[in-house]
Image (cartoon, coloured by chain):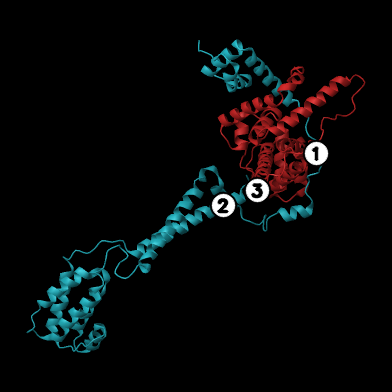
Chain colours: A red, B cyan
Amino acid sequence: MLDSPRLAIAVGRAAQPVDDLHSNEVVEDPIQRRDLILVERSRGGDLGAFNDLVECYQDQLFALVARMVPDRDQASDAVQEAFFSAYRNLHGFRGGSVRSWLSRIAVNAAMDTQRARKRRPVQPYPELEDDSWQPPAGPEADPERTAVHAERTRMLREALTTITDDQRNAIVLFDVEGYDYQEIADLTGVSLGTVKSRIHRGRLALRARLEDRMELLRSDR
Amino acid sequence: MPHLPDSHHDHDLALVAALAAGDAQGRDHTRATELVTSCTECALVRDDLVALASSLHSLPAPRRTRDYRLTAEQAATLRPTGWRRQPLGWRRFLGAFGGTGFRFATPVGTAMATLGIAGLLLSAVPSSLPAGTTGDGTNSAAGAPPAASDAAILESVVPSLGYGLSGGSAIPDASASAAAYQPAATGIAKASARAAAPSAAPSAAASTESVTSIDPSAPPASRAADLAQATTTSDTPVPTRTTTSPTALVFTSLLLLVGGAMLVLLRAASRRVTPA
């Protein structure tokens, strides 16, 4: 992905203003510069450039959406829809961080999926796939530690599916993805106070669900 | 030191959660600190929340099972018609309405359109009212007769002028006699036209008075001129009813309706042009 000739050229070239992105500032961050160049080329009709952008962000966006929408198939569809939407709206990109722009579109797609699920309630989220599997570790890996880690991951994922969508979105964006309060407020379209409140209440709700198994989490500290 | 409830169940865990997240400030911080220092269960809650946040941060990322790169066919489907040929200025114009500064456009547009529709309905009401009422809400007991009283006026005036007005509308006769008595015919026509206006009932009454004061011994032409002058002068002092013209109401309503609809449509179109 990052070793493709196109991206190597984009990242390696000297910093220069990127036209038609409503900003003449020189972008210093090489990743950001690469993204802007790819967006500019995509706008010019270069599908390969857009697919390079997809390659760069599909893992990240899928991880984000899959945590917000625990049903894998729905999450996958939401990510696909997010990339479709991004392609359709390339001309609406007004500069700034491409990652944030794509994340915002993905979060909106995930929230749309959640709303659609609310309108047509069928069943609770299905049993989650076990993502705790890790590549075979070296001989130094402790089997007990690996098992505890897998169990902790499984119960956290399960507990996350039981809290409200709003609380889960806020917790995933803050605790898992590492966005700050203001970014989450911008992404989800609510006030800063609401974001904080959802995170606090969501954590309390998670603790209530996991109360009898909290020892497993405490031992991690 | 603030009084704390004795039972842990009465303690405000939201404060403890805020403290664990580092968001408690001022009085909340003081109260939360009191809670975790004086209540072991609150302290445990705080520790659990910190442990939870830490564990969530280290959750492994779900693995993607699909490649989301677009095929040429998908791209062709997704690309709107004329995507690259649309002028930038047009998109920029629409994009201006898609910003947060124009968030008011949809509610304001809807309100304007609603007012417009209401106005149009109001202006349509008079035609559907039963006979005897007018659009301005007044009972036209004095309003229906104007046509009859107009005829009476003309009947009382015209025979004395020797025009031979006989039934039907006065205007054709007036115009018929216009060849001989052009100024007089014009004056009568004016008089009848004014009197025929539905809102001119008082004016018609006034013109009756002024017409009856015309000297019958004067020559027909000068009598007609007098009549015209009398009618004209009598119009001035008569108080006319000041009501909003239905045409103005219709026009304003249409303006509101079209303006509101345009606002709503512009906003909707701009939201399609600009992304989420």
State whether residue B184 is above or below residue B69: below
CB contact under 8 Å: marks 3 and 1: no
Chain under disc 2: B
Q: Position of residue B95 (x, y in %)?
A: 57, 49
Q: Amino acid at mark 1?
A: Arg
Kindly report which numbered mark, 2 or 3, lies closer to the viewer in this rendering.
2
Element type at marker 1? loop
The quarter of the picture where the C terminus of chain A appears is top right
Q: Residue at x 60, y 16 (%)?
A: B8
The quarter of the picture where the N terminus of chain A appears is top right
Identify the residue position indicated by label 3 in the image.
A91
Tell me how far mark 1 sits from mark 2, CA to CA.
35 Å
Marking on residue B268: 2
Kindly report which numbered mark, 3 or 1, lies closer to the viewer in this rendering.
1
Residue that sits furthest to the right in the current view = A139
Q: Position of residue B92 (x, y in %)?
A: 58, 50
Marking on residue B258: none
The one of B168 and A50 positioned closer to us in this rendering: B168
Identify the residue position indicated by label 1 in the image.
B64
Q: Amino acid at mark 3?
A: His
Q: Position of residue A53 (x, y in %)?
A: 75, 41
